[in-house]
């Protein structure tokens, strides 16, 4: 299952040290390549978004989708369109990272004393 949503604003408010600014807390959902989903699977995972559906949580638990939660400080005068563009940029970078990061490419490769069996974990 692909991530149903990509960016979710979880909360907003002024940062304590700069009440004229705004801070948005957000979650990013990225799709995990099929060959690596087993590496992200965890039956205890849940979403930081209180409105995540059972299917959303199941996708996170099965490693099909991965969630990252962060915040962005918004200077005074920044428009909604600018904030949205900044969040889309962060999601694009996160999705590219998840798509390209693969420290498990050769995990589970074995040598039996005579020959190697190499795995390709996508």
Image (spheres, rainbow, N blue to C red):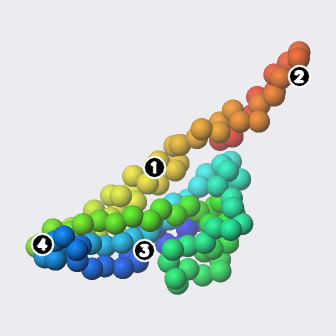
Circle 1: is it few (<14), some (14-19), or many (20+) Cα within 10 Å? few
Q: Which mark is residue 8?
A: 3
Indicate the position of residue 42 as horizontal and vertical percent values.
69, 61
C-alpha separation, residue under disc 1 versus residue under disc 3: 18 Å
- Mark 2 or 1, closer to the camera: 2
Circle 3: is it few (<14), some (14-19), or many (20+) Cα within 10 Å? some
The residue positioned farthest toward the left in the image shown: 77
C-alpha separation, residue under disc 3 versus residue under disc 4: 22 Å
Instruction: Tell me if 57 is positioned left or right of 4 in this view.
Output: right
Residue 87 visible in the shown view: yes
> Which residue, given by chain and number where applicable, does mark 1 sit on?
96
> Which residue, given by chain and number where applicable, does mark 2 sit on?
112
Residue at point 43% right, 54% down? Answer: 94
SS assignment at label 4: loop
C-alpha separation, residue under disc 1 versus residue under disc 4: 30 Å
- Mark 1 or 4, closer to the camera: 4
Residue 80 visible in the shown view: no
Among the two numbered marks 3 and 4 on one chain, the one whose residue lies closer to the N terminus: 3
């Amino acid at each position: 299952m692909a991530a149903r949503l990509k960016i979710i604003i979880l909360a907003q408010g002024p940062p304590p040290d700069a009440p004229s600014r705004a801070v948005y807390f957000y979650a990013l959902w990225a799709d995990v390549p099929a060959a690596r989903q087993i590496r992200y699977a965890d039956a205890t995972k849940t979403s930081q978004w209180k409105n995540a559906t059972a299917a959303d949580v199941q996708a996170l638990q099965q490693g099909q989708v991965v969630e990252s939660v962060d915040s962005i400080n918004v200077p005074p005068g920044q428009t909604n369109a600018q904030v949205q563009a900044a969040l889309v940029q962060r999601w694009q970078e996160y999705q590219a990272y998840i798509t390209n990061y693969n420290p498990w490419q050769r995990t589970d490769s074995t040598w039996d004393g005579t020959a190697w069996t190499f795995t390709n974990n996508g």
